[in-house]
Amino acid sequence: MVVSPQSHLSSHHQPLPAQYQTTDQGRASAEAYYNTNTTPSSTDADMSPKLSLASTIPLTNSKYSMPRLGFGIYQSPTDVCVKSCLTALRAGYRHIDSAQFYRNESEMGEAVRQSGIPRSEVFLTTKILSAGGSPEKTYQKCLDSVKAIDPSEGGYVDLFLIHSPSPGSAKRKEMWQALEKLVEENKARSIGVSNFGIGHINEMKEYANIWPPQVNQIELHPWNQQREIVEYCRHNNIVVQAYCPLVRNNKAYEENLVGIAKKHDKTTGQVLIRYCLQKDWVPLPKSDTPSRIEANADLYGFELDQDDMTTLDSLDQGPRGAIVQAVKND
């Protein structure tokens, strides 16, 4: 049975009308609806005073919540990753994002054990990129990740994602069914997807016992706002995670961003991450520099006002603004 997506619908999750939910409507229609019906003062700004480093967001059809700020460890070398994760945990992060492809799952888990923080207080994510060749082998690949991260008896991950839709429909089904089995066996508390467009998520209804996916992790920042898939996810109460929120420092000297940073006496990175939080995205900033790791969590002594949000919203370049990839919604 497909699970209803409505049980945890937040009041600020503005539904997308039915005529814009079909995959052939195109990005232009969604943007027109977004620009007409979304007002920063009534959505982004209203929630911002409530934010803190301890803020969480509920996951649909689940008793669990996710910390609103995460720490990304893509391309964090194995000899550095444990140190970076420990720095992040000392700075107050309680959410770390890894993947099989990153080859640092065990380092993430080791950092939590070294930190002395109870496992239950840290939200750990990983991802599977490719199927194993059979349902059994794919499940074993996922189970190996869980054991690498949390080898204790009763070990689990908080969130397991399909990393990409690129392997194709049959492999996506195989991977999702493996993730559902992890949930059944209490090896994963929540499951989701990454880089999935509207068509990919709708297709899952044909075979998923758990639908909607609880998370969709996509590239998001002012230059690549992906409004169509974001609005679809909000309508279906799918939490949107933002990777590359710092645009890999490629926009650190952009005039509008620098002006807002000077206005608030903050770094451009802090402005970009705060922007994500006020958009109701879950940002995953990445750094291996201790001072930057700490600064990227220092986000709660200021707020971006309506003018700031409008300026940053205006920088959207659509798919050409992506530095990794924009999802395909057809």
Image (cartoon, rainbow, N blue to C red):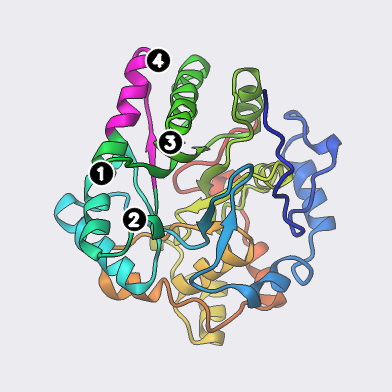
Q: Give the spatial CA distance, label 4 vs label 3.
A: 18 Å
What is the three-letter code of the residue carrying label 2? Answer: Arg
Instruction: Tell me the residue at 32%/30% (across/down).
Output: 143
The image shows residue 251, relative to residue 105, as above or below, that is below
Query: Foreground: 23 or 94?
Result: 94
Instruction: Tell me the residue at 41%/71% (across/down).
Output: 296
Q: Which residues are magenta?
A: 125-144
Q: Which mark is residue 152?
A: 1
Query: Whole-percent x and y of residue 158?
Result: 43, 46
What is the three-letter code of the residue carrying label 1? Answer: Ser
Q: Nearer the viewer, mark 4 or mark 3?
A: 3
Q: Is residue 301 left or right of residue 293?
A: right
Q: Quadrant of residue 72?
A: bottom left
Q: Are marks 4 and 3 in contact (CB under 8 Å)?
A: no
Circle 1: element type = loop
> Which circle's residue, 2 or 3, is located before the other in the chain?
2
Q: Is residue 132 visible?
A: no
Q: Which residue is mark 4?
A: 135
Q: Are marks 1 and 2 in contact (CB under 8 Å)?
A: yes
Q: Give the spatial CA distance, label 2 vs label 3.
A: 15 Å
Q: Which residue is mark 3?
A: 186
Q: Which residue is mark 2?
A: 119
Q: Are marks 1 and 3 in contact (CB under 8 Å)?
A: no
> Which circle's residue, 4 or 2, is located before the other in the chain?
2
What is the three-letter code of the residue carrying label 4? Answer: Pro
Q: Is residue 72 left or right of residue 152?
A: right
Query: Whole-percent x and y of residue 9?
Result: 73, 50
Q: Give the spatial CA distance, label 1 vs label 4.
A: 25 Å
Query: Whole-percent x and y of residue 217?
Result: 51, 45
The quadrant of the image that shows the N terminus is: top right
